[in-house]
Image: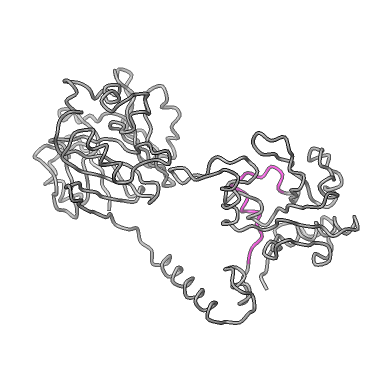
Amino acid sequence: MMELISKLPSTKYPMADVTQWLKFKNDSHKYIDPIFAGRLAAFARDHGKVLQITSGFRSYYEQVALYINSGGYQDKNGNWTGGNGIAAVPGTSWHEFRLAVDVSDSWAKAIDKDDATKSQTTLLKYGLYKPLTKGNGSTVLEDWHIQPIELVGVAKADRSKWAPEVRIVDVKDFQRAFGLTVDGIIGPQTKAKAKEVKELIDYILAYQKQKYTYTIKGDGTRVIEVDPLNLRHVWLRNSDSKPASELAKIYPNFINAMFFDGATCTVYRLLIQDGQVLSEIKSYDQWPDKGTFIVYKDGRVEVRTIGRDNFNTLDVPNIHLAFQGFNLDYEANGSTNLKESMRKEGWGQSNDYIYNRVCNRGAIGYNYKTGKVVIVKKKTDASGIRLAIREAGCKTINNDTCGIGLDSGDSDALVLDGKVILGTSRKQVSILTFD
């Protein structure tokens, strides 16, 4: 059978026969920490009643279902948000770590239901306690939820450290883990699942980062998709600043990125890489707020308008890469259209030349459904490149545009596998490399 090795002390609190004193509504939920289960059994025994448990161990997928049913969802960056607070965020519930139960007995729910942890004398005798939390906007305390006392004050990031070690020791364990009929017989279904698991294991062991993908649409739009953490910025200054044709010999895959001053090799404006600010927002910048494309070290991506006033809200040490252009989500700075937004960000000089000019343009966005950074290249104006990035799937769950416009015209460049796809004789200062 499945073997669970507890990390809780085994002799500190009373223990009793789990099979006699605990009854689980669902058979799969009985696989909770064995020491925790023994304490619950002793608690039930000493009250002379079998403890009815409606929920014990939950798989991650069960927790996801509960969280969604409570009103939660995943945002554009894959983070769980929302919900009424009744169900914990998937991956953080003590049920998933086999260290919590929900009971249905009125007698058990009534015990210590109004007491702070240190005053829950009845439960503490058995090494148990009720956190007595409640959902958002609710006045109902969860008097049905019981945990081991050792978990008081444990941070979410440390919860997995308390989970019992799980050892699969036979065929029935395998069947149980994958929702098959638990009979210990290696039949067609068990063999098929084993093959599926083996293929997954082989894939994991052989996995390498996927290279970029490149497609050309019927209207000529070029679309490149890359993994977020594959992006790197290269700031080319002085003698390092060269045309795309020369840089292709050094950097096999890159696009042009930030707007820049070729005479001084200054980039506009904010540039962060590996948790370090490489180019800061200047105190004299007349238009400090600009669209900012941010990739965090954990692979999350977001697009924000960042300036002097909200720079301190950035989690700089945890940023893999952040750089600026013009925010294609013009509503983000309170504008009613892209032209107005670009003026607010300082891109409206010379009668909105950057907005109006039809030329080779680039934009970079994020498709939260695929988890990919998307780069688009197209001959169009600023409004056209916004439409192109949206058509490439770079929209949030709320249908907002998730991307920024990059430098364009003579600065436009695209090099793939050492071949110049787009480029001029202009020397590059800011490029994004990838593989």
Residue 411 place in picture, x, y as percent: 16, 36
Above/below status of 59 relative to 182: above
**Which residue is at the front of the view, 102 or 318?**
102
Indicate the quadrant where residue 52 lies. Answer: bottom right
Screen quadrant of the N terminus: bottom right
Which range of residues does the magenta coloring cover?
Answer: 151-166
Would you say 266 lies left or right of 230 here?
A: left
**Which residue is at the front of the view, 17 or 109?**
109
Would you say 65 lies left or right of 353 here?
A: right
Identified at 59% across, 72% down, the residue is: 180
Instruction: Verify whether residue 303 appears in magenta.
Output: no
**Which residue is at the front of the view, 207 or 380?**
380
Identified at 19% across, 23% down, the residue is: 352
Residue 116 place in picture, x, y as percent: 79, 37
Indicate the quadrant where residue 235 lies. Answer: top left
Above/below status of 102 relative to 237: below
Residue 201 place in picture, x, y as percent: 46, 69
Identified at 33% across, 50% down, the residue is: 230
Would you say 386 lies left or right of 166 here?
A: left
Indicate the quadrant where residue 6 lies. Answer: bottom right
